[in-house]
Amino acid sequence: MKHSLLILVFFFTANAFSCSDLLDSSLRVLDSDNEQSLCEYTGNVVLVVNVASKCGYTPQYAGLQRLYTKYKEEGLVVIGIPSRDFFKQEFSEESKVAEFCSTEYGVDFPMFATAKVKGKKAHPFYKKLIAATGQSPAWNFNKYLINRDGEVVSHFPSEIKPESESLICSIQSIL
């Protein structure tokens, strides 16, 4: 009986924390050589945003930081992925991206290395996001919302601000 119970507990524990196909990806941490598995975010609500430091939407960093601060204790993780895909509106040096985000907007949510987010050369994680939604980023500050099971539940174009009612309602409904 003890062995059966132990196996049953292990089975449910392992399945409760198994990584989804979508999150089964790695990204390099911004301005670092360290790779991070996105499986670490299994069980959290994740908002993925392709960001840029020299874009008309760049002030959205402030709203993203406020969202992260407000909901991180409930399980929200905001991750920023800088991209130069749209008129190269991101610094080419990652140290400048990191400094800009920290000094200008106080960003402390996870930031990853600059990556391609559209087209044939898109990062494999972005290819998964695009396949799951049928929506490719059309510009900087495109947003994908992933539920605790590691499934994309919503896509928000750049013009939807981080603190918009539609985005906040979507986040609250899956927290």
Image (cartoon, helix red, strand yellow):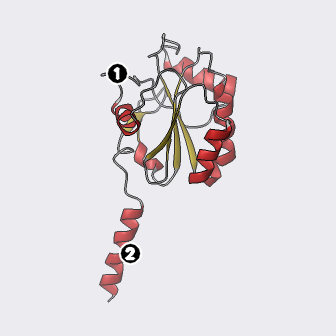
Which of these two is toward me, 107 or 18? 18
Where's the N terminus, which quadrant?
Answer: bottom left
Q: Amino acid at mark 1?
A: Gly
| Residue at the disc numbered 1 | 119
Q: Decide: few, some or many residues near mark 2? Use Cα within 10 Å; few <14, some 14-19, many ≥20.
A: few
Q: Quadrant of residue 124?
A: top left
Q: Is residue 105 above or below residue 172?
A: above
Q: Residue at x 42, y 48 (%)?
A: 151
Residue 9 — which label? 2
Q: Which of pointers 2 and 1 lies earlier in the amino acid sequence?
A: 2
Q: Quadrant of residue 17?
A: bottom left
Q: Decide: few, some or many residues near mark 1? Use Cα within 10 Å; few <14, some 14-19, many ≥20.
A: few
Distance from disc 2 to disc 1, alpha carbons, whole Å, reads 43 Å
Secondary structure of residue under mark 2: helix
Residue 73 % position (x, y): 64, 52
Where's the C terminus, which quadrant?
Answer: bottom right
